[in-house]
Image: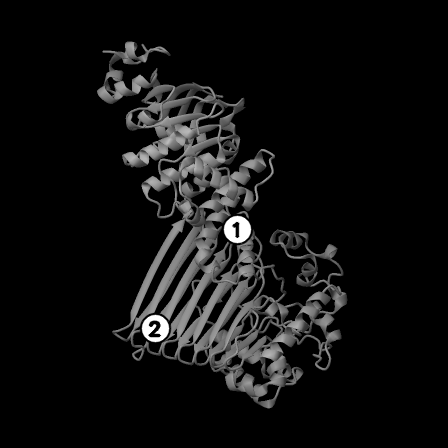
Amino acid sequence: MLKITNLHANVAGKEILKGLNLEMQGGEIHAIMGPNGAGKSTLGNVLAGREGYEVTQGEVIFNGKNLLELEPEERACEGVFLAFQYPVEIPGVNNTYFLRAALNAQRKYRGEEELDSVGFLRLVREKLKVLHIGDELLHRAVNEGFSGGEKKRNEIFQMAVLEPMLAILDETDSGLDIDALKTVAEGVNRLRSPDRAMIVITHYQRLLDFIVPDKVHVLADGRLVATGGAELALKLEEQGYAWLEDGGIGTLDETGATQAGTP
Amino acid sequence: MSNETSTTDNLVKQKYQHGFVTDIESETLPPGLSEQVVRAISARKNEPEWLLEWRLKAYAQWLEMEQPDWAHLNIEAIDFQAISYYSAPKADKDRPQSLDEVDPKLLETYDKLGVPLHERARLAGVAVDAVFDSVSVGTTFKKELGKAGVIFCSFSEAVQDHPELVKKYLGTVVPQRDNFFAALNSAVFTDGSFVFIPKGVRCPMELSTYFRINAAETGQFERTLIVAEEGAYVSYLEGCTAPMRDENQLHAAVVELVTLEDASIKYSTVQNWYPGDENGVGGIYNFVTKRGDCRGARSRISWTQVETGSAITWKYPSCILRGDDSIGEFYSVALTNNFQQADTGTKMIHIGKNTRSKIISKGISAGHAQNAYRGLVRMTPRADNARNYTQCDSMLIGKKCGAHTFPYIEVRNPSAKVEHEATTSRIGEDQLFYCLQRGISEEDAVSMIVDGFCKQVFKELPMEFAVEAKALLEVSLEGAVG
């Protein structure tokens, strides 16, 4: 579904991604962990096509299409969804209205019929129920005055309605207390599906207690330097990232990060 | 400003009017302004002597005045002798004979705004008999208003039919020598609207210039007078969202509102005069004096305006809060794109005790446009416990435009309270990206963000007007991004 090959990207003239490779199948959840400044959020922004993130080398093939050639809104319509680390407030724009505009733009792109407000509301109610979210978010302006937890829940709610093929969750756990974290993780788990891939970018192993990934990658200095199963995250939690830097890199193979990286 | 039913409409209506017929045969006066011209205008309109004298006094005062230059506007010198001050309605043969002859760009805009087909012809000034519908609507309308005792007619009609009312109120809010453009208007105004709501009457419907009976082409110097007697209420809509073409470049209108005790006037405007092309060529100069006088205690005047047109807008709808406990409100969206310039705002003059005023101004600037808010809040010594709240927000789209805020606050009463909040923001790259990432196109995203920004003002507009205003902003912002 997604194949990233030798991806290099600059931000403000500085190279942040330095040859990143990643391959994912539908239904998989991959966690990307790594120290500050490693390029985790950059990866999300590059995939979503944000202005200012300049790809200098490499290729991203998503469902057979060259993703890097598409405009950001086209990528969204192709099914790429970025759950923002800092969801943006849009004062005066109703949350429901916004989401319906987004869904209909995507449906139109795919040649599907647009939903009228009745049909849309039905869909929204359904999704809220599945996610166990109240409808108070519907009546407010997009993220305006939302608490940190509400903003993140709103991202997950949008994801549920838009039903992307590839969801990138950029530090969705940051700033959440344990209860909010559980709600968000539960939402994500409910949206797991065989034809949906998810990239979960996080700093902390904590989130992965609730969202169990198929693979864990360590992103350091612009590259994936280690890959393993869920147990890799636990090890990182215990030992930090330092052990990867002295000699671990390059000796890792696809399957067994643990033995390769053990000091 | 005016977006009245155009002359075609008028001509068609003439055939159905019994009794009152304007002199549609008269030709255009040669360019230039003199006492003779003022006399000629008054004579053609068959005005009483007192009104002629009133005009002449205004003209004499205008001669001694100078065009103001304090606004944040770059205006080319206007040659007042090069303008014709009275022009007869265009004859049918000189108009486009069908929509096929109308500028396709204009038609495209009508299409985007969802203007009904039969309206397009009227707006574009086509010589067709396609306006019968609005005539009959207008007639029904007038009957109902008559039952309630409401007078709603053209200014010229009012001068003929209700001279005592006109004489009593004309110039009492905006005196002839109030300012340069008001003086000019007072000397040469051609037509406009007159509304009178008698004591205790709540006007049974929203009044719109659109349905005004026998609306002559009011042209560049429009005069409007609205009086609400004790306890009366009226909501008045001026303008329409479809772009109006006018060959006159200079517009100088005057609007006067008077509310007596417990009366209330809600005045809503959508101004969409031709703004000039994307290079700043052409476009209307719009110099308007609008003022309301809350003469009676507990009366209320509320201005709501959506300004998207004109090359230059100079306009400060104001309230004089004379009556104790009276309320003045000003809600404004001013959008400028390309090379448009706007200097607009309000004045709230607190004279009575416990008077309150509220100002919500939203300025949006795109392209190379300049957008200034200029507002005065004055608390006079008598205005005990007066309060004002001002919120003034500017939004910039792109990097070549400008937003400016000039608040003037004068407080001469220690018990008065004045609050002022101002913000300026650029449409955030992050807001835009958030929308794009959800699949919304850049153009839709911008109009959505702008619409949200203006919400506080739009909700003051009558429902259908608000919907149209939103569409209008979208059309006006086309090409502002990317």
Q: Nearer the viewer, residue A228 or B34?
A: A228
Q: Nearer the viewer, residue B150 or B372?
A: B150
The residues tagged by marks 2 and 1 sit, at their Cα atoms, a distance apart of 35 Å
Horizontal relation, residue B258 to residue B110: left or right: left
Q: Where's residue B90, x and y in %?
A: 71, 69
Asked whether residue B66 is in view, the answer is no
Amino acid at pointer 2: Arg
- In contact (CB < 8 Å): disc 2 and disc 1: no
Rendered position, A215 above or below A141: above
Amino acid at pointer 1: Leu
Quadrant hosting residue B51: bottom right
Rendered position, A198 above or below B261: above
Graded by Cα atoms within 10 Å as few (under 14), some (14 to 19) or many (20 or more), the crowding at tag 2 reads many
Residue placed under numbered mark 2 in the picture: B378
How is the structure coloured here?
one colour
Q: Residue at horizontal 68%, vertical 52%? A: B104
Q: Secondary structure at mark 1?
A: loop
Of the numbered discs in the image, which one, if any, rests on residue B477? 1
Could you tell which of marks 2 and 1 lies nearer the N-terminus? Answer: 2
